[in-house]
Image (cartoon, rainbow, N blue to C red):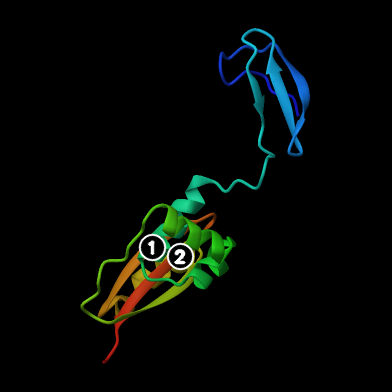
Amino acid sequence: MELAHCPQCDSNHISRNGIIKEKQRYKCKDCGYNFTVDKPGKNIESFFVTKALQLYLEGLSFREIERLLGISHVSVMNWVKKYHIVIPGRKNHYKPTTLILTYAELIEFYANRENLRGIGVTVTEIEDKFMLIKWERTKK
């Protein structure tokens, strides 16, 4: 993997300069700066990070988020720690239920008023479908 620019001076005159700790080392021919490049890993789009954190704040478990988004529950836990996400205390006891719906199913859900009685609803888009989270009050 060749770099196009030096991170120090932004020059494109760079050359390989050995291997350090199993990583390729480079040297800039203009400023003499030595640098290494991290191995490219699996980067997850910020859209999915944001979506996972939103779902966590909505009350879904790490495993539920993993099943819905296809992202490791460990990654979600690490993001919660990294961004210091804290769920505010809940005075009422609500049970979240999730549904994955197509656009037509979502319209049909909203068309029936009985589906909306006594619950809270949040809808979020996931690729070509919609995730509907509804909360019903549980009896203590």
Which residue in the protein does label 2 denote?
Answer: 131
Which residue in the protein does label 1 denote?
Answer: 123
Q: Earlier in the sequence, mark 2 or mark 1?
A: 1
Q: Is residue 61 left or right of residue 34?
A: left
Q: Is residue 83 above or below residue 10?
A: below
- Image x and y of residue 47, in percent: 48, 48
Residue at the image position 68 percent from the left and 40 percent from the top? 40
The amino acid type found where label 2 is placed reads Met
Residue at the image position 77 percent from the left and 21 percent from the top? 16
In the image, 17 versus 108, the foreground residue is 17
Q: Is residue 116 above or below residue 41?
A: below
State which quadrant residue 135 falls in.
bottom left
Q: Is residue 57 left or right of residue 3?
A: left
Q: Is residue 117 left or right of residue 97?
A: left
Whole-Å distance between the Cαs marked 2 and 1? 6 Å
In the image, 25 versus 55, the foreground residue is 25
In the image, 91 versus 24, the foreground residue is 24
How many tags in the picture? 2
| Furthest residue in direction bottom, as rendered | 140
Residue at the image position 72 percent from the left and 27 percent from the top? 25
Q: Dot 1: within a 10 Å radius of its alpha carbon, few (fewer than 14), some, or many (20 or more) residues?
A: some
